[in-house]
């Protein structure tokens, strides 16, 4: 099952304003007296968890820095194609089963005009939007993309936004493990794992809530250490975040092993099917793919683990 992790932007964190009555002469924040801004109470969550930095799947091990931006409108809808949003901030979020307070950096303020609403979206990696697009560097498939759909509020609502700002994983995750099976020669080592006919996320289009991916191509699993395939399943390389697919029959694996000297090729396995019980690569699901190496074949089993739990299996001869 997919876990929902809650956090909130409370009075300490999110204020929005733009009237001289409510800000200092320099426009840096509220001044004492009548008309002082009202804090937004904004709850939000992450579809599984959060981890600092990029180039890693977002998990429950440490805080993460997400991008949160606001657009103002009096027409009942935000223009997410605008050259820039009204404001751009980041926030550090941590995993918690209960709502917790976080703070925008820099702090933001309500528009003083009660007819103007602020529309808020968030995402990870924490990259500022430009012309309604969020573009990030992702060349090897190790970037975990999170996205939170729109919530909104204005000054007259006493700062309370009832809808949660929920961050969801937008890719499917592949984690590879290798294990020694019957008849495999002693000292055989894993060298290379590639995923064929897959794509990785590179940008977001805010107006349509769309994740944009590369063209389908072959992707090598990064940081596969040339190491002996043992009797206990061991992780090989970094997790990959790839494009979800309703039918993954075109996704294939290329695998290469070496003899115990670490350089002489022992065997190559090409066009190995990657099969799952649901026949898909599901958004927000992490598939643990265990490769069992035998004398003349690979037995493949794919198990979906949190983010979302399920099972899958497959066999290759």
Image: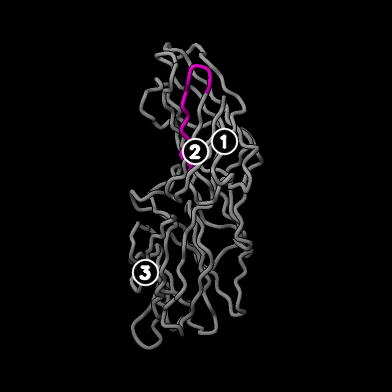
Q: Closer to the N terminus: mark 1 or mark 2?
A: 1
Q: For this rendering, which residue is in front, 316 or 166?
A: 316
Task: Report the residue at 62% width, 48% height from top.
Answer: 246
Where is residue 217 drawn, in percent x and y? 64, 35
Mark-to-mark CA distance, 2 and 3:
42 Å
Q: For this rendering, which residue is in front, 16 or 44?
A: 44
Q: Is residue 52 left or right of residue 152?
A: left
Q: Which residue is mark 2?
A: 302
Q: Which residue is mark 1?
A: 274
Majority secondary structure in the magenta region: strand
Q: Closer to the N terminus: mark 3 or mark 1?
A: 3
Where is residue 245 drawn, in percent x and y? 61, 46
Q: Closer to the N terminus: mark 2 or mark 3?
A: 3
Label 2 or label 3, whichever lies nearer to me, is 2
Mark-to-mark CA distance, 3 and 1:
45 Å
Q: Which residue is mark 3?
A: 13
Mark-to-mark CA distance, 1 and 2:
8 Å
Task: Report the residue at 57% width, 27% height from top.
Answer: 254
Label 3 or label 1, whichever lies nearer to me, is 1
Q: Is residue 157 magenta?
A: no
Q: For this rendering, which residue is in front, 117 or 219?
A: 219
Q: Which residues are magenta?
A: 287-297
Task: Report the residue at 49% width, 48% height from top.
Answer: 285
- Quadrant placement of the N terminus: bottom left
Task: Report the residue at 54% width, 51% height from top.
Answer: 283
Secondary structure beneath dot 1 equals loop
């Amino acid at each position: 099952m997919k876990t929902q992790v809650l956090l909130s932007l409370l009075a300490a964190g999110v204020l929005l304003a733009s009237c001289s009555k409510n800000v200092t002469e320099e426009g840096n924040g509220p001044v004492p007296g009548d008309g002082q801004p009202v804090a937004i109470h904004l709850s939000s969550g992450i579809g599984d968890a959060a981890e600092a930095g990029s180039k890693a799947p977002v998990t429950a091990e440490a805080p993460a820095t997400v991008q949160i931006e606001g657009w103002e409108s009096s027409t009942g809808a935000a223009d997410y194609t605008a050259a820039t949003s009204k404001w751009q901030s980041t926030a550090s979020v941590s995993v918690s089963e209960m709502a917790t307070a976080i703070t925008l950096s820099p702090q933001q303020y309500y528009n003083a005009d009660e007819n103007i609403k602020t529309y808020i979206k968030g995402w990870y990696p924490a990259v500022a939007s430009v012309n309604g697009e969020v573009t990030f560097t992702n060349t090897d498939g190790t970037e975990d993309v999170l996205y939170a759909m729109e919530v909104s509020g204005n000054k007259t609502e006493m700062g309370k936004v009832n809808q949660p700002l929920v961050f969801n994983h937008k890719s499917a995750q592949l984690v590879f493990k290798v294990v020694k099976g019957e008849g495999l020669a002693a000292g055989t080592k894993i060298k290379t794992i590639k995923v064929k006919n897959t794509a990785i996320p590179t940008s977001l289009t805010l107006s349509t809530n769309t994740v944009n991916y590369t063209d389908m191509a072959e992707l090598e699993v990064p940081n596969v250490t040339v190491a002996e395939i043992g009797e206990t399943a061991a992780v090989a390389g970094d997790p990959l975040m790839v494009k979800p697919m309703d039918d993954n029959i075109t996704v294939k694996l290329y695998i290469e092993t070496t003899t115990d000297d670490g350089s002489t090729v022992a065997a190559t396995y090409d066009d190995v099917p990657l099969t799952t019980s649901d026949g898909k690569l599901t958004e927000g699901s992490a598939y643990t793919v265990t490769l069992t190496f035998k004398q003349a074949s690979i037995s493949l089993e794919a198990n979906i683990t949190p983010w979302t739990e399920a099972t899958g299996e497959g066999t290759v001869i």
